[in-house]
Structure formats: structure tokens, C-alpha cells
Image (cartoon, rainbow, N blue to C red):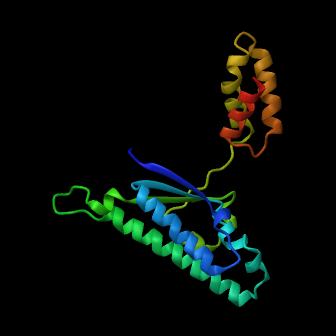
Amino acid sequence: MGLHYFEVDCWELISHKEEEMVSQIQEVFKIAERKGPCLLHLKHLNSLETGSPSFQQQQQQQQQHSMNRIVMELRNHLKKSFVNSKSKNNNDKVDDHNKRSIFVFASDKSLDDISAPLRACFHQELKIESPDESQRGEILQWTLTPSFPSDPVSLFALSSSLSYRTGGFFAADLISLSAKSS
């Protein structure tokens, strides 16, 4: 695809001062623009709302004002990157803005933890559920097969036992577990 990947842990953007947080968000987008075209991954998005100790100590009204300012800053940068990705010249070739497009996505442990104003900054939402016990068993059988090539009974017993005890694990967790146990 020819895109750079730039990952930012939003916990690193947390500051005791609203101005510093806004400045850090601006800096993240400046870096992403220089790396463009770029996939910008904002990890732990909810931390922008809950991470700052000073936010937690402020009065409710001032906290809401600060959060609104941070959300507006994020929204402005997202809108700018969206508009730039849509702009084209008359020859339908990618223009200079498109060469520097930023494609932004964010993640957090739970979609429900992210406030409506912060979620509204994004055009799409994707919720990835963890596999159920049966699906975890299949993933484990697939990843453990190299360790038990000639003993399908042991493989089935182990994968069944592990799938029962790994509720909430995602495929990557199960693959990592299998790799470390081999």
C-alpha cells in the first residue's frame, strides 16, 4: 500500500495542563503529515479523557470544557486529514495533499469506555469480539498442530482444556500462548 504506520499511545499525550495536551495532539498530526501517506493508530483513546490527574481533580464543568477542547482539536485534525484524502485534481491523479494523507484509526479495550463526543470524531466504528470457546478451540488446534503432528487425541484434549480456560482471549493471544508453549 505504500503507507507508513505511526502508532501513538494516548497515555503519552496526557499532561497536567490542557494546553500541553492540545500541543502534543498537534505535534502527533504534524509528524503523521510528514510521514504521509500514513496510518495513524491512536492506542488507548479513552486515556485522553480519563488519564490526567489534573482533569480528575478539576471541577466537573472545567473538566468538561477541557475535554471539549481536546475533542475539538482531535476532530479538526481528523476532518483535515479526511478532506485531504478526498481532494483530487482535474486529471484524477493524486494531488500533493493526497500524497500526505493521514488515515486515522483508534483503539481501546472497550468501545463502551469511549465517550460519545470522542467517538463522534470518527466516521466508522468496528467492534471486535473475542472468540467463543468453540472458536478458541479451533484456533488452538490450528496453532498447536505442529507440536502434536502424530497425536490428534492429545491435541484435541489440550486444545479443549485450554479453550475452556482462556475466555476473553483473542486470536493473537492464543497464537502467542501456543508459540510460547511449544
Query: Does residue 10 lie above or below 153 as drawn?
Result: below
Can residue 121 be spotted in the picture?
Answer: no
Q: Which residue is drawn at the image coordinates 46% and 68% (left, top)?
A: 78
Can residue 79 be spotted in the picture?
Answer: yes
Query: Does residue 182 lie above or below 137 as drawn?
Result: above
The quadrant of the picture occupied by the C terminus is: top right
Q: Position of residue 70 (x, y in %)?
A: 58, 77
Q: Residue furthest left?
A: 91
User: Left of 43 or right of it: where is 158?
Assistant: right
Most foreground residue, 74 or 175: 74
Most foreground residue, 30 or 63: 30
Q: Residue furthest top?
A: 150
User: Left of 137 or right of it: where is 38?
Assistant: left
Q: Position of residue 153 (x, y in %)?
A: 78, 16
Q: Which residue is drawn at the image coordinates 45% and 49% (left, top)?
A: 4
Numbered circles on residues, count = 0
Q: Which residue is drawn at the image coordinates 75% and 12% (left, top)?
A: 151
Query: Does residue 38 lie above or below 15 as drawn?
Result: above
Quarter of the view holding residue 22: bottom right
Q: Position of residue 75 (x, y in %)?
A: 50, 74
Most foreground residue, 151 or 73: 73
Q: Position of residue 10 (x, y in %)?
A: 63, 63
The quadrant of the picture occupied by the N terminus is: top left
Quarter of the view holding residue 114: bottom right
